[in-house]
């Protein structure tokens, strides 16, 4: 075969590969567009910010008729209203005013506030007090509240006094007219275990009112989705507990019209904790004992129809521990994944409902190399691409008898007709590249 024939053969191969790639991309595009009912390609816009002592992330697919400014303002305004109602960090909020009040008469609150407390009281009743929003004094006593954090373990007398002011049965709630009522003047409440989920629901509902039906809303790890995104369903990651870095253990697809719901919340003891004299103290307080939980449950993930429900139940099941949590989850048809630590530095998983599918294999607690595993296929692909490029360049050398040109000012700069040299990639004169490098070196030495 002559050199000319070889080149023609290579051109034919290149043409066939290009045609295959073009055909595949065209088919994929057609499938994506057909799945969108011919509404055209959708873009994803992302909004981030701070709220409730944590961060939020909102992704909106499509809804191009609504501009960015309107979306961001609506998100921030709705979250501002949630904080004004339920943040213990704001002295002017409804919850702070209620906590300061010593009246045992009905205290007027917003309808949203009353709805959240009603849901919280329902979960408290079903868990026999394992979930209890009157736990605020205990949270403060253990240095996990809005007060100054001393990270000191309270003594027995202090806990006994605080426990006398705690108990969900000491709180009454009504929705018409919306109000709360204390049975003892000292009663205080804390909605941090359910308010973030409620905030997620509020943002999803607000975006829906604006015409954004395909959204992903996350506040501090609590997530709810609606619709889908270009290319398929939204996916929510369940993290590996105790990992040195955020390591996704499971990526769950939030399918449209999923009967279990499209809201997910996770409660764990590995984010907010401290150690005193070698003992670990978690921010998850058991209202029945007045102390942080001590069982082996590392994290609890719940999927529900609303993020408020998922948030509240994740905390409740985390307080209960694995066996009681599984029992009540099966009894109340709760979709949950429980991850427990074992003595062998591994995790044991158990699940119910739609999340039971992930309880088959337990990840290694000591395995924090998820990033390395993800890097391997990238390295293989990169090696393959570079091998092909080097092979193609070698063919050029063998058959074309030309030097391999490098980057600006590098090996074998291209020689022009006038004798000057220039970069074979950008065609700028090599002298200009040298002047730039000299100036950069001079700036570094100053």
Image (spheres, grey):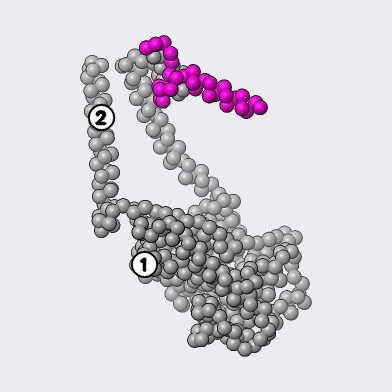
Pick the quarter of the image with the C terminus. top right
Tell me the element at label 2.
Answer: helix
Quarter holding residue 387: top left
User: Are dots 2 and 1 in contact, CB under 8 Å?
Assistant: no
Identify the mark at residue 13; answer none if there is no mark. Answer: 2
* Spot occupied by residue 341 in the image (x, y as percentages of width and height): 58, 61
Disc 1 crowd, CA 10 A, few/some/many (<14, 14-19, 20+): few
Q: Earlier in the sequence, mark 2 or mark 1?
A: 2
Say whether residue 6 is magenta: no
Identify the mark at residue 50; answer none if there is no mark. Answer: none
* Nearer the observer, 149 or 428: 428
* Spot occupied by residue 175 in the image (x, y as percentages of width and height): 50, 84
Q: Residue at x 40, y 14 (%)?
A: 415
Disc 2 crowd, CA 10 A, few/some/many (<14, 14-19, 20+): few
Report, in whole angstroms, how far the alpha carbon at label 2 lies from the one at label 1. Answer: 46 Å
Magenta stretch in the rendered image: 417-446
Position of 161 with respect to 343 (left or right) is right
Pick the quarter of the image with the N terminus. top left
Identify the mark at residue 258; answer none if there is no mark. Answer: 1
Q: Residue at x 46, y 22 (%)?
A: 408
Q: Residue at x 43, y 61 (%)?
A: 70
* Nearer the observer, 305 or 296: 305
Quarter holding residue 170: bottom right
Tell me the element at label 1.
Answer: loop
* Spot occupied by residue 322 in the image (x, y as percentages of width and height): 54, 69
* Spot occupied by residue 88 in the image (x, y as percentages of width and height): 62, 71
* Nearer the observer, 332 or 196: 196
């Amino acid at each position: 075969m002559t050199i000319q024939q070889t080149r023609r053969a290579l051109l034919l191969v290149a043409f066939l590969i290009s045609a295959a790639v073009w055909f595949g991309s065209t088919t994929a595009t057609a499938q994506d567009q057909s799945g969108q009912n011919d509404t055209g390609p959708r873009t994803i816009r992302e909004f981030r910010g701070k709220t409730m002592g944590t961060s939020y992330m909102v992704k909106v697919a499509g809804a191009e008729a609504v501009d960015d400014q309107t979306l961001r303002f609506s998100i921030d305004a709705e979250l501002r209203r949630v904080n004004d109602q339920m943040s213990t960090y704001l002295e002017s909020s409804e919850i702070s005013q209620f906590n300061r009040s010593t009246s045992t008469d009905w205290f007027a609150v917003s309808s949203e506030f009353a709805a959240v407390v009603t849901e919280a009281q329902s979960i408290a009743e079903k868990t026999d007090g394992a979930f209890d929003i009157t736990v605020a004094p205990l949270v403060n006593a253990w240095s996990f509240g809005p007060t100054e954090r001393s990270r000191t373990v309270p003594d027995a007398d202090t806990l006994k006094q605080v426990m006398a002011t705690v108990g969900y049965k000491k709180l009454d709630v009504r929705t018409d007219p919306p109000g709360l009522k204390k049975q003892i003047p000292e009663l205080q409440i804390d909605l941090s275990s359910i308010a973030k989920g409620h905030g997620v629901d509020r943002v999803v509902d607000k975006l829906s009112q604006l015409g954004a039906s395909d959204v992903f809303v996350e506040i501090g790890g609590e997530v709810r989705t609606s619709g889908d995104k270009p290319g398929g369903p939204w996916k929510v990651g369940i993290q590996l507990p105790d990992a040195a870095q955020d390591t996704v253990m499971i990526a769950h697809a939030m399918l449209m019209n999923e009967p279990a719901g499209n809201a997910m919340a996770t409660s764990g003891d590995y984010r907010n904790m401290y150690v005193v004299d070698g003992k670990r103290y978690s921010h998850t307080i058991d209202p029945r004992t007045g102390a942080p939980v001590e069982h082996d449950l590392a994290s609890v993930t719940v999927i529900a129809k609303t993020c408020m429900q998922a948030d509240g139940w994740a905390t409740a099941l985390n307080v209960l521990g694995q066996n009681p949590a599984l029992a009540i989850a099966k009894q109340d048809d709760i979709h949950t994944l429980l991850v427990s630590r074992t003595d062998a530095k591994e995790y044991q998983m158990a699940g119910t409902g739609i999340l039971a599918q992930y309880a088959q294999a337990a990840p290694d607690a000591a395995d924090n190399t998820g990033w390395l595993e993800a890097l391997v296929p990238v390295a293989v692909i990169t090696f393959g691409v570079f091998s092909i490029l080097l092979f193609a360049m070698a063919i050029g050398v063998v058959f074309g008898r030309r030097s391999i040109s490098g980057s600006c000012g590098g090996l074998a700069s291209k020689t022009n007709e006038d004798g000057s040299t220039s970069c074979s990639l950008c065609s700028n004169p090599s002298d200009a590249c040298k002047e730039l490098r000299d100036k950069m070196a001079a700036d570094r030495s100053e």
